[in-house]
Amino acid sequence: MRVMERTFREQLFFLVLCLSVLKGDSRYIETNEISKDELFSFFNSELKRETPEALMYRRPLRCLDMVAVEGQFTFTAERPQLSCAAFFMAEPNEVLTVEYDNVDIDCRGGDLITVFDGWVMKGEKFPSSQDHPLPLYERYVDYCDSGSVRRSVRSSQNVAMVFFRIHNAGSSFTLTVRKHINPFPCNVISQSPEGSYTMVIPQQHRNCSFSIIYPVAIDVSEFSLGHYNNFPKRSMPGCAESGDFVQLLGGNGIDTSKLLPITDLCISFTGPTHMKIGCDNTVVRMVSSGKFVSRVSFSYRLLDSQELQTIKLNNVEDFCFNN
């Protein structure tokens, strides 16, 4: 249930992030290219330090930012900033609340602050609409629309983000970010390229995904379903018909509905299933009918450059390098 510490992040390939804000009432997102190195340069040891309870961590918020700790983060515009985004991330077994504080922006003049329940990258959303419990329109909470009615937004998973657009120098706002334990995590983006994890769905009709945004070797060590215990391990082409199964997905985006299936598992087993997946994003996705307690355990590690080169020649997995 615990993800190991992150290593070698500076060596990793990642998606070019594209963020924006649509014009009009929907206040959605368009395109703005951002590199992986820019984004994860904010994910350093200073941000991961423990914060004493008596003293809340505070620092300025950047137009493009990554935040992995609780605290208060204040943005003050020195000039017009029309396409900004802050990514917030917690541990796999946590969710986030984002609170609006001391907001001084011009909503009538076109300014906005919008919290999104999940992440948006390159026009794709995590979790996908198929896997998230809320309809898409409820995942956007705009300060200018909700005002004092809803000043706090709670995420459904360990990631959330805030889009903001400020026209006038001197305008500012503060966000207070807090973390809360989630006893049954569903939909996770891993902070680390290596670790181990156990995903459990306790008799709930839902889909849960664990997203590893690195090329990795993955070992599925255990998969159990209440109605298929003690059956031999095997992969079946018709797993979707069972209503309870695990998918391994790969691709270069974060929307699981757009990733390509690598294999499906719908028979319980204990014993390793090993695969190397050279994609920017590797996903373990569990689909549950809600009739049984479903459980899958797996470990993963970053692929080295030699392993990646070998996979490029593999006809099964070269789609990761062609998309």
Image (cartoon, rainbow, N blue to C red):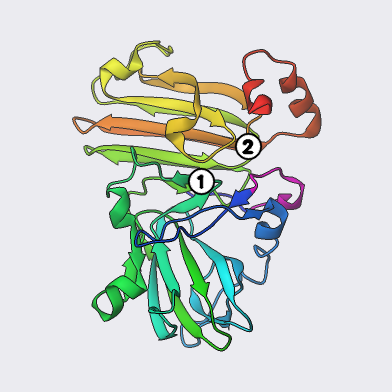
Residue at image position (50%, 87%) is 55
**Total numbered labels placed on residues in the image:** 2
Badge 2: residue crowd in 10 Å (few <14, some 14–19, many ≥20)? many
The residues colored magenta run 6-16
User: x, y percentage for residue 230?
Assistant: 32, 16
Q: Residue at x 65, y 62 (%)?
A: 43
Estimate the x, y position of residue 273 in percent, counting from the top left.
53, 21
Q: Identify the residue under disc 1.
A: 123
Three-letter amino acid code at disc 2? Asp
For residue 74, above or below residue 218: below
Point out the tag, 1 or 2, that comes first from the N-terminus.
Answer: 1
The residue sitting at 63% across, 40% down in the picture is: 214
Q: Marks 1 and 2, Cα distance to the nearest angstrom?
A: 16 Å
Residue 300: which disc? Answer: none
- The residue under label 2 is 280
Q: Is residue 63 visible from the viewing direction of this image?
A: yes
